[in-house]
Amino acid sequence: MKTYDAIILGAGAAGLMAAIEAGRRGRRVLVIDHAKAAGEKIRISGGGRCNFTNMTVSADRFLSRNPRFALSALKRFGPADFIERVDAAGITWHEKALGQLFCDGSAKQIVDLLLRDLAKAGGELWLDCAVGEVRGGEVRGGEVREGFTVSTARGDVSAPALVVATGGKSIPKMGATSFGYKLAEAFGLPVTETRPALVPLTFATQELEWMAPLSGVSLPVVARAEGGPAFPEALLFTHRGLSGPSVLQISSFWREGQGVRFDLLPGVDVAGHLRTMRGTQGRQGLAAALTPLMPERLARHMAGLLAPDAALSTMSNAAVEGLAQSLHGWRLTPVGSEGYRTAEVTLGGVDTAALDARTMEAKGVPGLYFVGEVVDVTGWLGGYNFQWAWSSGWAAGQVI
């Protein structure tokens, strides 16, 4: 049986980062993944350009039972630290809105960077390798007895340190499973409720009847789920419901039975615009008045919903104010989401109360670590989840 100083389960962002850091410290490291290629979620992220971090990192950009848990790792290895590695590799990048950083070229550049660093650090990588039973972790006198043994398709391997970086349930067609959560529970660690996050929202048939003809329509909005923050980003209509950055953001906060609200014309004095139009082009209807402000198909729908067949000249000031309020606070009630099939991340995971925030080690099982998406730390859309992967992987890599 081959032995190592550390075994990392999962060759994604967090797992590769942990392996690189441990390897640079002289540790003999093995990374195992059942996928045929490493870093597949990195490769497809950001439309193929990888939104690899965000310039703004704070506790309020993460969802968790304890959002401050992430700060220890994020402060010690933050966006500037990963950017330094990207720059050193000669990867050019650009900043989009809201501090989001993307590669100028392909996301595969980030994967190649990580694999080069792993090879330089002496790490070993087993891909297309199924993992079976994990044994060990027995504690006697405060010490782990015999470390951990992992059964794999290539035979058993063992190490005193085991890092679980298996990700969440999102995008099962890429191999996502519940393995990490089940492993945590097997070692007695609590797992918080998990659900799809950063995912399009779906609607009942009666809503889809009018939404489907709007498929492809996009516009900037301010979106909010009940009890959640406001997100000033784009809304996209699809044949299944609503998507776009604003909807992906609020999906992490939305719960079944709740409504969501959209300011369809943020920053626009809608009432003032309608009063002006009423005075100069009073014979027009609401659709014509709204078309300069939003996509025509949506303008027609909103007019049919709020003021069908009514000329502007017939509207009182109170009616105009009411229309403006409706457009600034349009409320819809989703029936669900597209689920893990398209969710970018999984909300929830291994309870942070069971982990050391500085090292990512399980408090009751010395030598066992959890990093990345498998942990109950979920970032907003915009590079936060990748930064958590880099930071948590880095933190574990300093001590395994």
Image (cartoon, rainbow, N blue to C red):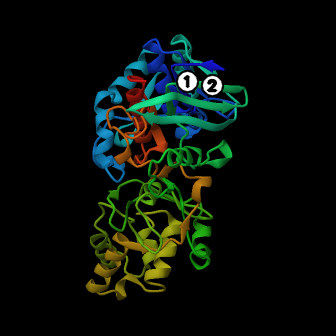
Identified at 63% across, 64% down, the residue is 239
Q: Which mark is residue 109?
A: 1
Amino acid marked by disc 2 = Val
SS under mark 2: strand
SS under mark 1: helix
Question: For this rendering, which residue is in front, 320 or 400?
Answer: 400
Q: Locate residue 227, reporting x and y percent.
A: 32, 66
Identified at 40% across, 46% down, the residue is 377
Q: Locate residue 383, reporting x and y percent.
A: 42, 39
- Outermost residue, front direction? 141
Residue 163 vs residue 313: left or right?
A: right
Amino acid marked by disc 1 = Gln
Quarter of the figure with residue 261: bottom left
How far apart in space, not on screen, are marks 1 and 2 (Cα)? 31 Å
Q: Which mark is residue 350?
A: none
Q: Which residue is mark 2?
A: 157
Identified at 58% across, 59% down, the residue is 339
Residue 333 vs residue 357: left or right?
A: right
Q: Is residue 390 above or below residue 84?
A: below
Question: For this rendering, which residue is in front, 315 or 157?
Answer: 157
